[in-house]
Image (cartoon, grey):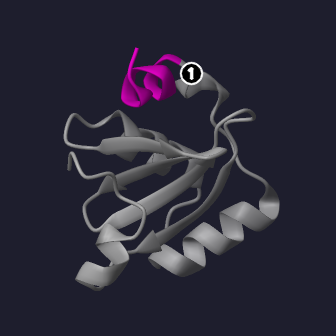
Amino acid sequence: MNEKHILVANLTKIHTTKLGIARIKKNLNLDTDDVVAFCKNKIYATDCFVYKEGKNYYCLIDDIRFTIHANSYTIITAHKITTDKQFVKGVPDEL
């Protein structure tokens, strides 16, 4: 089972903290009250690329990179990707 399938199979476990909500809203300039639902929808999308490095999953979609702890399924952060250097940081060669 690849990383994307594992993450989607555990979609109901994905969550974040109050600080995580504030950080994600700030980093992505979100105006939604349900940050977790926003993240889950992005992760579930067919064009979302998921890879695992160390203890985290990284999800790339729509110039956004989500970082999710692999054991607890906690969304740690999300960042807009603004440069090619940010995009390729840590991305496996098969992308």
Q: Which residue is drawn at 66% across and 27% down?
A: 13
Q: Position of residue 44 (x, y in %)?
A: 35, 33
Q: Where is residue 34 in the image (x, y as percent from the top left)?
A: 57, 51
Tag 1 secondary structure: loop
- Whether residue 30 is visible to the viewer of this picture, yes or no, is no
Q: Is residue 40 above or below residue 2?
A: below
State how many labels appear.
1
Q: Position of residue 69 (x, y in %)?
A: 67, 45
- Whether residue 85 is visible to the viewer of this picture, yes or no, is yes
Q: Which residue is drawn at 31% across and 71% down?
A: 87
Give, as a three-letter code, the residue at label 1.
Asn
The furthest residue to the right = 18
Quadrant assignment for the N terminus: top left
Nearer to me, 95 or 62: 95
The residue to which callout 1 is attached is: 10
Q: In this view, does 35 lie to the left or right of 13?
A: left
Nearer to me, 75 or 29: 75
The magenta region covers: 1-9
Q: In this view, does 92 lie above or below 3?
A: below
Main SS of the magenta part reads helix
Q: Which residue is drawn at 51% across and 43% down?
A: 37
The image quarter containing residue 61 is bottom left
Is residue 20 magenta-colored?
A: no
How would you rate the neighbour count of disc 1 (Cα within 10 Å): few for under 14, some for 14-19, many for 20 or more? few
Q: In this view, does 36 lie above or below 9?
A: below
Q: Residue at x 36, y 78 (%)?
A: 86
Q: In this view, does 85 lie to the left or right of 17?
A: left
Q: In this view, does 53 lie to the left or right of 49?
A: right
Q: Where is residue 58 in the image (x, y as percent from the top left)?
A: 47, 51
Is residue 4 magenta-colored?
A: yes
